[in-house]
Image: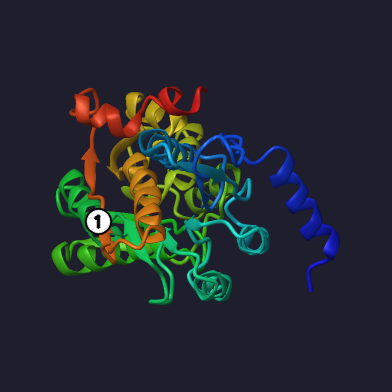
Amino acid sequence: MRSTFVGLSFCCLFSLIGCSNSKVEPSADSGPKKLRIAVIPKGTSHSFWKSIHAGAVKAEKEFGDVTVLWKGPPAEDNRTEQINIIDNFVTNQVDGIVLAPLDRTAVVKPVDMAMAKKIPVVIVDSGLDSENITSYISTDNYNGGKVAAEYMGKLLGGKGNVIVLRYQVGSESTEQREKGFLDTIAKDFPDIKVISSEQYAGATQPSALAQAENLLTRFKGEVNGWFCPCEPVTAGTAQAVKNAGLGGQIKIVGFDSGPDVMVAMREGIVHGLVMQDPINMGYLGVKNARAAIKGETVEKRVSTGEFLVTPENMNEERSKELHSPDLAKWLGE
């Protein structure tokens, strides 16, 4: 049972200062009360989540009747903290929740609790093992893995050895990417052998770097290609390959971007990135939550698309919008 102190601490925190980029609630005589929509990412440190935040703030500013309450665990491996955040937002009776679940099963119960209290819950980025939600907005992650596999096959000329360094257990979005990649390689590229697909990188770039270094030692001289299902894994793997003096020799296809990842692409270490549209994801999350609060019908499933960025197209306008968005426009960073 969570202590009363924790509940009171969160309550005081929300009452006194709100959350990052939140606005002060208007007084009773200053106009209609704004809808409070909590936006809870898997973590707050990676570029992808900052883009989700930017999209949520974009919606906040566009609609004018919404206050975004942004809060998530710093790292993407703290399920307990994310559950506590959800519970406290429910206790504080927010009007709606936009959530990127850290675990497809662990957060089902707190989501059920929110829905039971008539708080609409919009899931973004990564799925949940439950239909008891308002809407689900994400990339088609399986197809993203398929796109990555097809590009890997092209890079390797249809033959060679590849490694899939997984993210972490329970993350539905990355599990679907990994499955899409592995299924497509097995089906369409019989001369490409997956020599490792059971290792997990963990939630951070340093942990991914350590795992990638271990795999490079284990499969020294055997690796031709490497698939990474998200930003920290891509960044950690690229650093390991660079440190080993193998930049350009091992074809890396990743998912999502970030400053370190884009530097690695410019250096010829990363060869392809399947990009999502996290700003749109955050925007639509708040938009659908707002609509549901107002009693409007929203789409149960919304796909925000997949886009392959390569060294050849990385400087095109659409590519730059996805891999290096202008977050300062919305977040002031």
The residue shown at (66%, 58%) is 92
In the displayed structure, does residue 96 sit left or right of residue 19?
left
The residue shown at (34%, 55%) is 291
Residue 289 found in image quarter? bottom left
Q: In the image, what residue type sits under mark 1?
A: Ser
Between 138 and 62, the one nearer to me in the picture: 62
Secondary structure state at the residue bearing disc 1? strand
Between 168 and 66, the one nearer to me in the picture: 66
Q: Which residue is mark 1?
A: 303
The residue shown at (41%, 23%) is 329
The colour scheme is rainbow
Crowding at mark 1 (Cα within 10 Å: few <14, some 14-19, many 20+): some
The residue shown at (57%, 74%) is 113
Q: Which quadrant does the N terminus fall into?
A: bottom right
In the displayed structure, does residue 172 sit left or right of residue 280?
right
Query: Is residue 103 shown above or below 43?
Result: below
Between 107 and 69, the one nearer to me in the picture: 69
Query: Is residue 146 shown above or below 52?
Result: below
Residue 173 found in image quarter? bottom left
- Residue 36 is situated, as x and y percent measured from the top left of the image, at 53, 49
